Image (cartoon, rainbow, N blue to C red):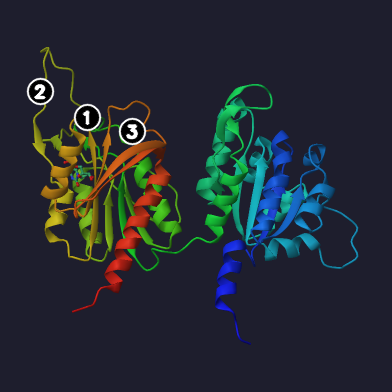
Amino acid sequence: MRRNKKRDANFAEVNPLHGKTIILGVAGGIAAYKACDIASMLRRAGADVHAVLTPNAKEFVTQLSLTTITRNTAHCEQFQAQADWKPEHIDLAKKADLILVAPATADIVAKMAAGMCDELLTTLILASSAKVMIAPAMNPKMLDHPATQNNLATLQNHYRYDLIQPDYGELACGDFGTGKMASVETIVAAVAARLLEHRTLSGKKIIVTAGGTREPIDPVRFIGNRSSGKMGIAMADAAYARGAEVTLISTVEVDRAYQVLMVETAHEMQETVEAEFDGCHALVMTAAVADFRPLGFSDQKIKKTVKEDFSLELTKNPDILDLLGRIKRDEQFIIGFAAESEELLSNAAQKLKRKNLDMIVGNDITVPDIGFGSDDNAVIILSADGSKENLPRQPKRAIAEHLCDIIAARFSELETLPTH
Ligand code: C5P
């Protein structure tokens, strides 16, 4: 059969999700009315959408609306009498490429985290090996409650479900805060990105360092810093999602599917990075490595002295990036981070040059609410080729995605270069 390439390309543009089966799980919150728009947009993008409502969701939106919009029977009952011998939901669970729960209420988030399956939607989620994405929508206090936060962390970190962050705004209950379901467009874009995800870093080994080092003074005390490790973990997660073989060398404990090597001091970090470096394609040093460590380590806890003053002699730590910048091969890509409290641009530019890096990501630590400990950052990216880019405030994961784009573009450039 002759194929019309132009028509195929056009079809893919209009129907990017053609051939993808999506289960749209709708839980019982007021934002359930938006599920109709989500279903419609996904269907128009070419997806085969099957809506599954929790019994509570039927209080907000009807099965008939979702059946009409998706052009597939919307399900709700777990124990429906059926014509066929085969439980329909198991078939649906098997053929789904992705399960999107939107809106995800605090209740369904808790059930999912606990692995409960007392109605059709949670049963399908347990019975499926499809990707799962959740778009929470709830009152800000419910979202903020440690129970909900723990459940969301379990879904993200243990089950590797994707969270589509709720927005800040006025909620149906009249309260202002974070908890409003992300916009329909944001949700559909996130689903499309997940389904069409390009494994742009597949076959590449990427080392990421994260967290702040701790330099021991005695058995109970150390010199540390405020780094939370969030930027490095976001970077490792993003690279892993793109198919990279990731090694995260971290001072912060995390439970991930990729390799995580725990270290404490700058020396341990140096030894571990050096051991991994030769075989890596890229090194991303987000870790805040202590520049100095106590010259001596006291085996016993240091007692309060009779004198008013106590001085601790410090000695310089090795600069890991500086050492690796000297031995790196041309095809290896090294990214450093520069947290600065003054002269961001010139200090970052100097470090880029001095440490022989390919790129440096600078952030101004005097700006309130971003950087250390925060989920957001705003950075400036300087490259060895002289280019400069400003990324305004955004989630650390979004910054990580941008850095992954740059790394992937660099690798594909190298691959297209003539070998001699
Ligand atoms: O010179 P400065 O410490 O500000 O440079 C920051 C960058 O250098 C970060 O990427 C950090 O991980 C790295 N670094 C290092 N070894 C050190 C200190 C910092 O690799 N001892």
Taking the image as drawn, is residue 283 in sight? yes
Q: Position of residue 61 (x, y in %)?
A: 79, 41
Residue to which mark 3 is pinned: 372
Q: Quadrant of the N terminus?
A: bottom right
Q: Position of residue 138 (x, y in %)?
A: 64, 32
Q: Position of residue 4 (x, y in %)?
A: 59, 79
Q: Is residue 2 left or right of residue 214?
A: right
Residue at the image position 61 percent from the left and 86 percent from the top: 2
Q: Amino acid at mark 3?
A: Phe
Q: Is residue 404 left or right of residue 314?
A: right
- Residue 7: quarter of image: bottom right
Residue to which mark 1 is pinned: 341
Q: Are marks 1 and 2 in contact (CB under 8 Å)?
A: no
Q: Of label 2 and label 3, which has the lower sequence position?
A: 2
Residue at the image position 17 percent from the left and 61 percent from the top: 328
Closer to the eye: label 2 or 3: 3
Q: Amino acid at mark 2?
A: Ser
Q: Residue 103, labelled with which disc? A: none
Residue to which mark 2 is pinned: 311
Q: Quadrant of the C terminus?
A: bottom left
Within 10 Å of the Cα at label 1, are there few (<14), some (14-19), or many (20+) other Cα atoms?
few
Q: Of label 1 and label 2, which has the lower sequence position?
A: 2
